Image (spheres, rainbow, N blue to C red):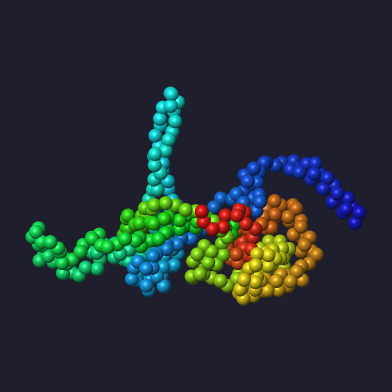
Amino acid sequence: MANKFTRFLTDVFSGLTNPKGRVANYTHATRLFLDDSFRLSPRTKFNYYLRIELDKTAHRAQNFSAKHAEEVGLLVKTAELPKFKFDSETLNQYNRKKIVYKMINYEPVNLTFHDDTQGVVSALWAIYYGYYAKDRHLPNTAYEANQYRPTQTTKDLFRYGLDSDITSPLFKSVTIFTMGRKRFIGYTLINPRIVSWQQGQMDYSATSEPAESTMTLEYEAVTYSAGTVSEGSPKGFATLHYDNAPSPLSVAGGGVSNLVGPGGVLDGIESVFGAVGDGTAFSSGKGFLSTAIAAANTYKNIKGLSKDGLKAEAINILSSPAGTQAVANTISGVAGAVFPKNNTGLTTTSGSQKNLTQTEGSS
């Protein structure tokens, strides 16, 4: 026992005086992206959610609003974030160059949709087209040859094109939410209007490529928002076609008898005390039940801890920089969900988390 203790002290001393050993490199980039629980890690392009808010009083397709309005955003394949461009002019101020702004321009953005087999995306365009253009609702007789008339005729039998009484926009807003570490940032396009709609191309020679439609939007302004990701936050998120059954690797689904890592004891304690601290545990019956299940599973996992297991985990954390990542693996994604994480296996997110900035709501 004395020899083991002596070797332990020797290892600690050598680690303090020569922490990198004989061969090591600097880890500036690793420290940048991993420090503070991946606070500065790059965002992933696939982790986003889009919501189109329609003015339900402006159109008559109430069945679409009730059943499919929230589904449209889920069918977006690619989405461009807002783009800005300043018109500027360089002036001479006693031979000193001075740049001044003349105007800010909001450049168009493109959204690409999967052309679904039910026709939800096509229905969106049909509603928009029929709302602004009279042509969609005209009968075939409106285009017969006998509709030609002398120029002195005061009024046509039909109204064509944009000859309508539309005063309010059909799209109230389009918002793209980028997500990461249980937080979202929202980019809201104010009063967007479609300036181009392309319904793709059909091709027999294509090798089972999915059909798609592309929409180009112009907009009047952009606002920003930020908040915590959860069911219904941002609005409409995780409410349709979302798998709410907890993963067996998560605390809610049972968890694991480890001290650290996804679904471990520390993860469970953070989940329970976080839910109690922010009021989630008592906000609803569902919240109370979820917290109670997490507490029961955490207690079960605590009983399952063993000395050998704790020792192995401690050695792994102290001896391997990658081992420390397990402690922070819960700082990502949506609470209660399991996502694949680059080079680190599965990542479970559960409970609540500390907000990085007080930026709830919109600005």
Q: Is residue 102 left or right of residue 33?
A: left
Q: Position of residue 292 (x, y in %)?
A: 68, 74
325 versus 128 height, above or below = above
Residue 112, by quadrant, is bottom left
Asked whether residue 269 appears in the rendered view, the answer is: yes
Q: In this view, does 346 lie to the left or right of 82?
A: right
State the count of labels: 0
249 versus 313 height, above or below = below
Residue that lies at the very extreme toward the top in this rendered image: 95
Residue 290, by quadrant, is bottom right
Name the residue at 77% across, 62% down: 310
Name the residue at 9% across, 59% down: 152
Q: Viewer-proximal residue, 68 or 315?
A: 68
Residue 204, by quadrant, is bottom left
Q: Where is residue 316 in the image (x, y as percent from the top left)?
A: 73, 56
Name the residue at 66% across, 49% down: 35
Q: In this view, does 326 lie to the left or right of 229?
A: right
Asked whether residue 129 appears in the rendered view, the answer is: no
Q: Where is residue 278 in the image (x, y as percent from the top left)?
A: 65, 64
Query: Which quadrant of the rendered structure holds the N terminus?
Result: bottom right
Name the residue at 61% across, 73% down: 284
